[in-house]
Image (cartoon, grey):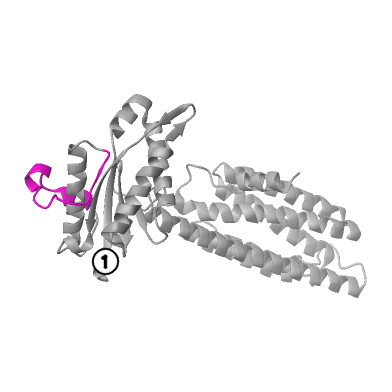
Amino acid sequence: MSSGVFRARWVRLTRPPVGLAPERRRSYQIFIHVYLFAIATHLAFIPVFVALDVVALMLLNLTCIAANVLAIVLHRQGQRTAALFIKLGMVSALVVLSGMLLGGETGCEYFFFVILFEVLISDLAHRLKLLFGGLVISLILASEHLLFGSLGSWPYSELSRELLFSLNVVATFVLFMFIVLQVYTITEVTERRFRTDATHDSLTGVLNRRAIFEKAEGCWQAAQPFALLLLDADHFKSINDNHGHSAGDEVLRHLAQLLGRTLREDDFIGRVGGEEFLVLLPEASMDEALSVAGRLRNELASCPCRLESLALSVTLSMGLALSNEGDKLRDVIDLADRRLYLAKSSGRDRLLAQGGENQGEQVGEGVTARLLQGVPTKDNA
């Protein structure tokens, strides 16, 4: 099996279900990796039990592998508590029976701490964590003082016992390190995804309304000159009506990709409405902003959105305003929106970078409020 196929199957196996709540995804991924690593650990111990010639432990170890496979199935079906109890129950039985047959001081008792750690990092309710944590501690004490050695003692040399002890200690620490690493890595990935979801538009991948205006607010507060380019896809409603909303979504994604390829490295793109995008151009002069807009129009003309055999040509109406054209950020945004309105009302497929200063009656009131709806800025608070 090639590495690419294996990686694809691994990703498919460990990927959280689509309908799983975001706050549950971290735990899901942690424990799916724990179950898989536990299977690998049990497989590694098969030669040890074969060498010791303890049939009961060999069979129980194989049962633990089957239990982890069942735990993975239940985990993927959403029965995560049952999966955890089956896995931990079988491991506890293996540890206790190992101590009973081989005696104490073989290192198997250290696996109790891995069991306790898994209980504590699980999604169990706090009361259940305390309850089962107490049960694990009780089992540790009972095993050490009552159960270990009750069915036999170490039948081989002291050196071999020390080797098994060392193997169990190493295996315990490897399990601990693996689980801690998974917790850290998956938590970091999950938090990064949450941050991205909070600031980016889910359809196009560009910044959302709040995030793009926060970028503009930051430039304004730092007295950094910038240009705002507000653009709107012409006749977008007819695309939805004639070709379906999925085609409209593809057009928006296509437009966002073209914007990403056309803009400068330090520019920002945000989706502020259904088919409206706002482009923030820090440190851009009028000529530089016009150049960016021109490149975008040329790129869009040469690269229509292709849907199977259909090519959808899209044009843009754009309004451009510079930061020095307003006393407040909302004035600059309002001016860009007025110019966008004039571009659309005068025939579409054009850019306006002048005029619009006295178009309040024609555009209608509340233009900036529409764009800034739900966005708390110092300027419009």
Please identify the quadrant where the C terminus is shown: bottom left
Q: In this view, which residue lies farthest toward the left?
A: 361
Q: Quadrant of residue 341?
A: top left
**What residue is drawn where x is 62% and y is 63%?**
179
| Vertical order, 141 against 318 (above or below) | below
Query: In the picture provided, is 178 more to the left or to the right than 369?
Result: right
Residue topped by disc 1: 225
Residue 232, percent from left and from top: 28, 42
Residue 127, percent from left and from top: 48, 60
State yes or no: residue 369 in magenta.
Answer: yes
Query: In the picture provided, is 48 more to the left or to the right than 270?
Result: right
| Vertical order, 235 against 207 (above or below) | above
Callout 1: SS: loop
Q: Quadrant of residue 347?
A: top left
State yes or no: residue 113 in magenta.
Answer: no
Residue 119, percent from left and from top: 58, 60
Tell me if I can see residue 104 in this picture: no
Query: In the picture provided, is 267 more to the left or to the right than 161?
Result: left
Nearer to me, 142 or 379: 379
Nearer to me, 332 or 27: 332
In this figure, what is the number of numbered marks? Answer: 1
Give the residues in magenta. Answer: 349-372
Task: Name the residue type under label 1.
Answer: Pro
Tell me if I can see residue 167 in this picture: yes
Nearer to me, 44 or 222: 222
Please identify the quadrant where the N terminus is shown: top right
| Vertical order, 171 against 41 (above or below) | below
